[in-house]
Image: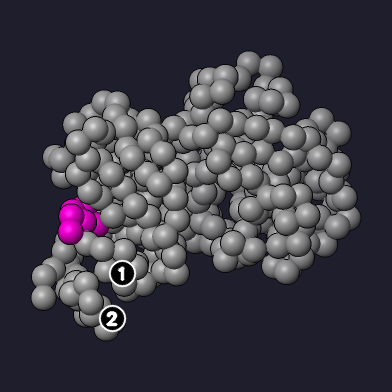
Amino acid sequence: METRRTLLIDAFADEPLAGNAAGVVPDASGLDAGQMAAIARELSASETAFVFPDEAVDRRIRYFTPEQEVDLCGHATVATLVHLHEDGALDAGEGRLRTNAGVIDVAVTDEGVAWMGTGEPAVEVVDLDYERAGDALGIDPAAMQDVGADLPAAVATVGLPFLIVPVNFLERLGEAEPNMDAVAELAADHGATGVYAFTFDALDAASTLHARMWAPGAGVPEDPVTGTASGACGAYLHAVDAFDDPPAEMRFEQGHFVDRPGLVRVDVDGDDVRVGGRAVAALDGSLVVPPADDDEILEA
């Protein structure tokens, strides 16, 4: 049986065992969908990225959860870009990647920060039932109503829709004890993938905000660090004029309450939204890949 180099890379983090873990197979040439699905199941990361050469753009990437193929994944893209750059396979600068969702613009800085473009942003303010949201999230409704007069709740998207809910203080956000069934219903009723709650009361003075995200309806009770939701929140902050003087780059903390602290960088310029961050390898090895017609479980 052949083997393939396989990594677990923690995205939106600068040290291992933090941020959001993604599997990366830097050379997936010749693997079929069944083999990729088997590798993703073996790694058990939320998503695994499989990298192929492409004649028209820098790389072709496909993404698999342990259950199915998905069109795009932000943290797995950041993880892949950082690895390819550090491995000498991708020069710093701008580039393009082909995904099932289409071709996306990406970049890697000389310092090793990876950036990816997102879909066109859209933001719609909603009339949120704060009592219901409070019961679902396990947050005092007053902590959301207190901010809601100036910063309304909204559904925002840069590819995936999220219900964005401002909270007054970090202490209130940290006390959240969500009822996952109720959160899933709340998100679904607003046409959202999940609920992204944030506060400007961040841990680090250099951070723009601190956030948590729950998407139980999509099989994610609480995501450690979420690139697509961060991009949606960045679009939201600009749409509701949250800043007198919007910063050129925003920094969103997430993951501290699930012991996976991370930092997402968000840049918004009109309809152009980018998310980015660092990444670090936590595991670098190889897996034995079964033949294409072999349904047996992978051997580590």
Please say if 175 is above or below 167: below
- Check the image and name the residue furthest to the bottom: 296
The residue drawn where x is 51% and y is 56% is 224
Mark 2 crowd level (few <14, some 14–19, many ≥20, 10 Å Cα) = few
Mark 2: amino acid: Asp
- In the rendered structure, the answer to whether residue 100 lies left or right of residue 147 reads left
Q: Residue 26: give x, y in percent of width and height.
A: 21, 52
Q: Is residue 160 left or right of residue 192?
A: left
Asked if residue 288 is positioned above or below residue 259 in the image, the reply reads: below
Which image quadrant: the C terminus?
A: bottom left
What label does residue 62 carry, if any?
none
Label 2 secondary element: loop
Question: Which residue was labeled with disc 2?
Answer: 295
Q: Is residue 120 left or right of residue 284?
A: right
Q: Amino acid at mark 1?
A: Gly
- Mark 1–mark 2 Cα distance, whole angstroms, equals 8 Å
Q: Which span is picked out in magenta?
A: 25-30
Query: Of the numbered discs in the image, which one, if any, rests on residue 34?
Result: 1
Q: What residue is shown at x 28% (from left), y 81% (from top)?
A: 295
Give me the residue at 27% from left, 83% from top. Answer: 296
Q: Is residue 29 within the magenta segment?
A: yes
Q: Residue furthest left?
A: 1
The verdict on residue 183 being magenta is no
How many neighbours does mark 1 have within 10 angstroms: few (below 14), some (14-19), or many (20 or more)? Answer: some
Percent of width and height locating residue 47: 40, 59
- Residue at position x 74%, y 35% from top? 124
Q: Residue 181: x, y in percent?
A: 73, 69
Q: Quadrant of residue 1?
A: bottom left
Badges 1 and 2: C-beta atoms under 8 Å apart? yes
